[in-house]
Amino acid sequence: MTISLLDVMYVPEITKNLLSMGALDEKGIAFTGSGGQQQFYKDGDLVGSSTKRGKLYILDGITTVNPDAHLVREAAHTSIEDELLGCGFVEPSSLLDARPLERILLHCDKPPATLYEWHVALGHQSLAYMRKMSQRVTGMENINFDSIMPACEGCAKGKLTRPSFPESTTKQAEKLALVHSDYAGPFPTVSRAGFRYYLTFLDDYTGMCWVYPKADKSADSTCATFKQWEAMVNRQSGKRVLTLRTDGGSEYLGSFSVHCKLTGISRQITVRYTPEQNGKAERLNRTLMEKVRSILFGAKLPAHLWADLVNVACYLKNISPYKDHEKVPLEAWTGSPVDVAHLRSIGSRVWAFIPSQERNKLEPKAKEMTLIGYSHLTKAYLLWDSTTNKLELNHQIKIIQDPAQPKLPLELATVPGFPPGFYRTTARRTVDYRHIR
């Protein structure tokens, strides 16, 4: 006899399957038994049994996984909004196993093929960093770096050109020895979920960063978020935060200062109007916002998605090269190799598969949505429904339109009168000039 369990929750951290007696009772299952044995009945028919071991009853039989199961369902008490907090995901340590799980559980056609498509999939990453990244992760083996990359409208509109903050010459020797933190905001557009700021934490040694969209930046709210983040990273790394570098804003005072004193965290507070003293946090905010703007403009997405995009920007930053470490931050933090074969262009319009349990025989098998990120809890793509303004998770999608399609072809001739690196683009009778970096 085979029993199929529907609407179950997949929790990677749990090593045993748990079956709720209360949930079975709600489904009309009756229980009877004694002496360490228990039987389950449905409409008078025996459908299963269990044997007592210790304090628990173990279901008799063999557990198998349905290959058609879609690991995309949420627990009733866990919202997608909760999942998105921190580095694009809640638990970065379980994001990647030693096996490339994304290749097993994520199904999407049209992987990035050209240099420009990879540029967009990586959040408008520079060519130099793409070269470095291809040597430190798997999944980028077939990129032709000698090909010409078309001009990118998203980069032209979304990236800054101001000088960088000076590099620090002090290098840390272990995780959490020095953590940088900063706020960005308030943003002129309230996010889809009601956020106006975001809070970042950056580990100086590995380069691993975390981002938390916030509705406000009060000291109590900041302290609560910090405690949540601190507990997570302490458990993941086996170490504790030693020193925290921030500016002197009121959000890092009050209850926040009290917590740091009680837990023995040393504080480094920068002087007012000297952001260069917290240069790494400032550079992180700049990098995240450059990616967010480039995605917004390149894919022509609405501005209220900025908080959702800052999460995926943080994830892409964590799988990109970090100057102070030979490994990308996510691998340096988790110790697991990083595979990027699952990446697609953020902002792509996609067909999202609808499970048979959620439709009748006459309803469509897919609906149109927009790809805006990734989920690690269910190894799924994070999709936005423009009609409902809500997010959904799905591991099976088909791309309709990829924003990484250049609108203007390139002529491979240097433009007279322009320095090297400028090329002429043509479309019908129009001529435009773009700088290729």
Image (cartoon, helix red, strand yellow):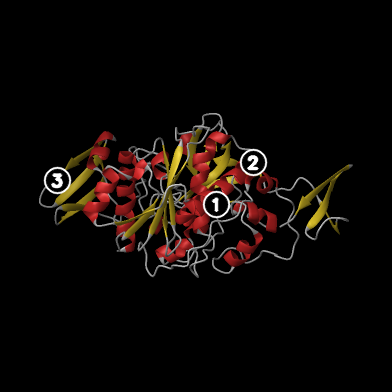
Residue at the left extreme, as displayed: 35
Q: Secondary structure at mark 1?
A: helix
Distance from Cα at disc 2 to Cα at disc 3 = 64 Å
Residue 364 in the image, given as x and y percentages of width and height: 57, 34
Judging from the image, what secondary structure is the residue with disc 3 in? Answer: loop
Q: Which comes before the other along the chain, label 2 or label 3?
A: 3
How far is disc 2 from disc 1 in space, using C-alphas?
16 Å
Among the 4 quarters of the image, the one containing residue 331: bottom left
Task: Name the residue tied to disc 3.
Answer: 33
| Residue in view at x 48 percent, y 46 percent | 311
Q: Residue at x 57, y 54 (%)?
A: 343
From mark 1 to mark 3, how far is it between C-alphas? 62 Å
Identify the residue under disc 1: 287
Between residue 267 and residue 402, name the one nearer to us: 267
Q: First in sequence, mark 1 or 3: give its number.
A: 3
**Which amino acid type corresponds to the residue marked 3 in the rendered image?**
Gly
Residue 256: numbered disc: none
Q: Are marks 2 and 1 in contact (CB under 8 Å)?
A: no
> Which label sits on residue 297?
2
Residue 234 pos. (x, y %): 30, 58
Q: Is residue 59 visible?
A: no
Decide: few, some or many residues near mark 2? Use Cα within 10 Å; few <14, some 14-19, many ≥20: some
